[in-house]
Structures are given as C-alpha cells and as structure tokens.
Amino acid sequence: MPPQRGTATAAGGARRHPFVSRTGRGPARSSLSLHLASQPIGSMPRHSRHRQGSRRIHCRQPELSCACQIKEDLVGSVRDEVLSFSAQHGLMMRMRPDADPTGVGMVHVPVSLLPAFPIPSRQFSAARDLAKPFNRLVERIASDPAYLERVLGAAADRDDFTRKLLEIHRKVEGMHMPSIARRNLAIHRSDYMLDEATQAILQVELNTISSSFGAHSTLVARLHRHILSKFDLGPGEDQVPYHDTTGAIVDAFASAVEAYPSTSSGQAGELVVLMVVQEGERNILDQQIPEHALWHRHGIRTVRKTLTEIAQCCQLTSDGRLLILDPTVGNGEVAVTYLRAGYGPGDYPSKVQWQARSMLEQSKAFKCPSIAYQLVGCKKVQQNLAEPGVLERFT
C-alpha cells in the first residue's frame, strides 16, 4: 500500500546524502542512470563536462563492471548477437518519419556491445541507496507550496510555461479536497557521473516526470549479461547488476490502483492507467513493455492518449472521478495518470492541452507525477537546493 499522505513509490535503499551540487568544467566523467534504485544504463556514453562539488573518496575498490575488450575476429559475431537480442526482446524504437513514412518501421536503440565503463561497486551501491531518501525529499518539497512559489516566482514572471504550471498548482492546492493534490505516484530517475580523478559519484539531475528507459535499462542489463556469458568475456555476467525495473514500475502502478478509492459504477467501467503520450512518439516500446507487463502481471489495462485526445474523450465528474468515454478503447475510470508527455512547452500548443492537464490534476487519480512533483524537478529548484542551508530545512 502507498505510504503516508497518499503517496505511492517504487524504490529501494535508505541513506541520507547531499542532493545536488554546483556545476562547472572538469575532466572526463563516466555516466550512469539509476531508475528506481535499479541498475545503470550500460550504453550511456562518457561526458566531458559537469564537475560538481562532492565528498571526495580516495580508495581502491573492486569494479562493478569492467570495460571488456573483444578480439577483432569476434566483433562481427558479438554485433550480430546484440542486434538479434535487441530485435527479439524489444530493445527497439520507431524509425524517423523521413526514413519510414509508414510509421511501423523499427530500429534498435543506440547501445554498446559491452558495458561501456567500470564503476566502483561502493559508488554504485551508494547511488542506489539514495533512491528512498530522494523520494522522501521530493515529497517534502512538494508538500511546501510556499517554497515552490518563492523559488519559481521569478522564472514564472518571464516564462509562460512555468507560469501556467504554477497556476494549475495553485488551483489544485486550493481545492475543497486538498488530499487530491497530494495523491502522488513517484517514478524517478536520478542521473550521475563518476569523477574519474576522484572516483566520486556526482549527481547531474533528478527526473520527476516522464522518467524514461525503465524498460530499456532492464533489457540492456540482460543483454550485456548474455553477451559476457555466451562469449566468455571479462569477469562474467555477475559483474553487471540486474534489477527488474519494469516489474518494479508495474507493481507500483498495481499498488496505486489497489489503493484508489473507487466508487465506480457500471457506466464508468473498469479501473485503468491513463498513459499520457506525445504525438509521433518514437520511444514507444519503452512505454509499451511496462504497459503489457501490467496487463499480464496484474490484469490492469493501460489506455494511451495525447493531451489533445484527453480533452476530447475524458470527463471529470463532480466528485473528482476521471472517466474515459471512448468506444474505440472502452470506457474506464482512471486510477493512475502516467505522464510520458507534458514536460515541455511543445506539449501545450494551445489552451486545449492546458485544460486537459488541469483536468488530470483535479481528479482523484494517483498522478505520476503530480504538478507539484513536476515543479520539484525544475532545474531552478534543484539549483536552489544546492545553496547553503536550503537542503537542511527538508531533512
């Protein structure tokens, strides 16, 4: 069941740690992304910027994964195996419209043949253990609307997108049912870099909306474990950690659906997850893999709609229920709204899309994320948290 204040989360570990630091220039870094305290996206490239202040760690440690080398005569075979695995398991994305006007062609996602860089196990574990503390931090900040108003107020004066987000936030916070605004589902992804000179893990950002690659990161780990094992490369597959991130995400959805205070009538139909998507989405399999897993593991249906379509086929009742009334997909009562869109100005070309987003926020559904959680993820907020004494008020 979701924890306090109607917030459902899916993450692991618990340890207090600084949130984010200032950025600047510095030597090369290695990158990793942790999705719900899962495992790194092994195909992420090296980066040359973002030097951030952090506690420095000076020690030699065993490596979690190693940059293995392939004999030249094996490269072709490994490449073919990677392409075959990608096609079989859905490590794919739609082709660009100019390359495939039909919209059905697929190409494999960019991926390395082997784990791209070594990560010290202690640093990996430390980053993984930060998932729960970061989730709690997001919830505490989201519960302080005055802080969000103060930090984002100047930006809202100059930026229409931020201003409209804050307007919706004020509206839902001022509703006669304030618990609706606090009904959150957290699926976050925290991105880190490894300072190669100091071996310190440095956070780049925390994503609170449309945190992608949960399904693909799961598949990349499986792919690299498969390649290392089959071709007998490096120290072995146990050096590539595996976590069923897809399963963790869909189990979180199922927990939220179970906790949803349903008053569904025959007209409303079954409880569903509403996935808010963009027009012409290319990264569709990263979305559809958890959609299918949610159905097969829990028997819960997912309905995909753009904000424009939501405005056309969804209805908000007087008691806060969000209903999908669409004969093409079947009627349903929305227990969870899952945003894989809505994070940038381009998703709101007219007032129609803003009205749809406002309707989602005013509903009883668990929001993944709520407008408050989205605001917490703004870079201006994360910049402010790096100022002396700011983070301490939330810990």
Image (cartoon, rainbow, N blue to C red):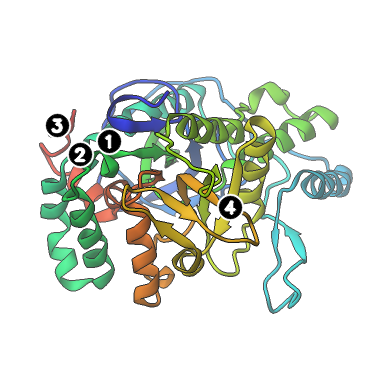
Foreground tag (4 vs 3): 4
Q: Residue furthest front?
A: 266
Residue at horizontal 51 percent and vertical 36 percent from the top? 253
Residue 303 has which mark? 4
Q: Nearer the viewer, residue 360 or 52?
A: 360
Foreground tag (1 vs 3): 1
Cα distance between the residues tagged 1 and 4: 27 Å
Is residue 208 shown above or below 250? below
SS assignment at label 2: loop
Q: Quadrant of the C terminus?
A: top left
Task: For the residues labelled 2 and 1, say whether their Cβ atoms are less than 8 Å apart.
Answer: yes
Q: Is the residue marked by circle 1 packed among few (<14), some (14-19), or many (20+) residues within 10 Å?
A: many
Residue 65 visible in the current orientation: yes
Q: Nearer the viewer, residue 124 or 320?
A: 320
Is residue 217 shown above or below 377? above
Task: For the residues labelled 4 and 3, say whether their Cβ atoms are less than 8 Å apart.
Answer: no
Type of residue at label 1?
Glu
Marked residue nearer the N-terminal end (1 or 3): 1
Q: Which residue is mark 1?
A: 139
Q: Quadrant of residue 158?
A: bottom left
Type of residue at label 4?
Val
Q: Which residue is mark 3?
A: 392
Type of residue at label 2?
Ser
Q: Which residue is mark 2?
A: 143
Foreground tag (2 vs 4): 4
Residue at horizontal 87 percent and vertical 43 percent from the top? 74
Marked residue nearer the N-terminal end (1 or 4): 1
Type of residue at label 3?
Glu
